[in-house]
Amino acid sequence: MKEDKAEILHSEAVREIISNPPGKLVRWGTAAISAVILIILIFAWIIRYPNVVPSPVMITTENPPVTLVSKISGRILNWYVSDGETVRTGHLLAVMETAASIDQVRKLRESIEEIQDPGSISAGSLPSFSELGEIQEYWGSFLKNLSDYDNYVKNDFYGYKISSVIREIGGLEEYILRVKEKEKFYLENQRIEERKFIRDSSLFADKVFSESELDISRQTFNKINIELQDVRLDHAARILELARKNQELQDYRIKMVEERARLFSILTESLNNLKAQIRIWEKTYLIISPVDGIV
């Protein structure tokens, strides 16, 4: 055993390590690292941290309590819940004192919420309300605008005007066709009289016709020319009148569309104002639960 140890101590690898001691840089580095570790251990022993750190804590429930405050000052008119009662979101809790009837306001809201197209209903199909408080003015305005729109649609003022003008246009077109036929006959007669006057003029030149006979022929020819011009003037006048009637028809059609759109716009606006006023009234006088919970 001793011989083995002696052999290890005097081996080539051991002799090489012993004969080559570490350099100065390695010795100083090792000493510095050891010093740092020693300082850390000393500070770790001196500085001690507590196991418990005291701190203020506020513990709340998953849904914290909600405080409801009325938007107006006054007494509560009606309570709809009792202490400890479970309520859902949107549940009516109380109503502040108001001049309006809560039942009528509810019924009004239900009635107008069903209205998809205000132009498709009539004022007579809606219920009567007389206890709406500050909403009454908006309800009256809506009824008036609805009545105006109903009367416009039922009376169809521009519709009757349009029908009347269409009939006049039809009569004018038929009259113009007859005038054209009349003009053809007068034109044919004018050509006949013209040829006759030319012949009579030749006979007068040949001393066959007297001057008085030629004058009669000239008068007849002039008369047919005048009558032909009258027919042509009448034709032109009727053409102008037809153009005016067509323009009048177009104007009535435009006015009919514009007036209906104007009245419908006023009606829709008054309906939106009524809905907005109901929402304002509800936010002002109704106390409604914003969340699920217990009173």
Image (spheres, grey):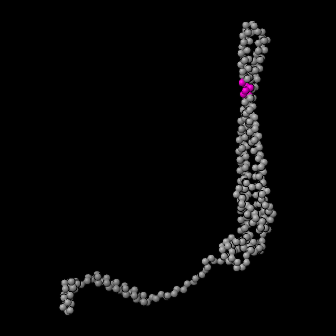
Q: Position of residue 239 (x, y in %)?
A: 72, 32
Q: Nearer the viewer, residue 179 or 283?
A: 179
Query: Which residue is pictured at 37% across the width and 85% down the height?
Result: 37
Residue drawn 66% across the image and 73% down it: 291
Give the quadrant of the C terminus: bottom right
Nearest the eye: 205 or 145: 145
Residue 95 shown left or right of residue 16 in the figure: right
- Residue 201, image quadrant: top right
Quadrant hosting residue 194: top right
Task: Give percent across and percent down for residue 260.
Answer: 73, 49
The answer to whether residue 271 of the structure is visible from this angle is yes
Q: Which residues are magenta?
A: 179-184
Q: For this rendering, which residue is in front, 185 or 131?
A: 185
Q: Residue at x 22, y 84 (%)?
A: 17
The picture places residue 65, in percent across and down from the top left corner, at: 65, 77
Q: Quadrant of the N terminus?
A: bottom left
Please, is residue 149 above or below residue 194 in the view?
Answer: below
Q: Is residue 183 magenta?
A: yes
User: Is 53 or 21 nearer to us in this picture?
Assistant: 53
Residue 272 in the magenta stretch? The answer is: no
Q: Position of residue 215 (x, y in %)?
A: 78, 14
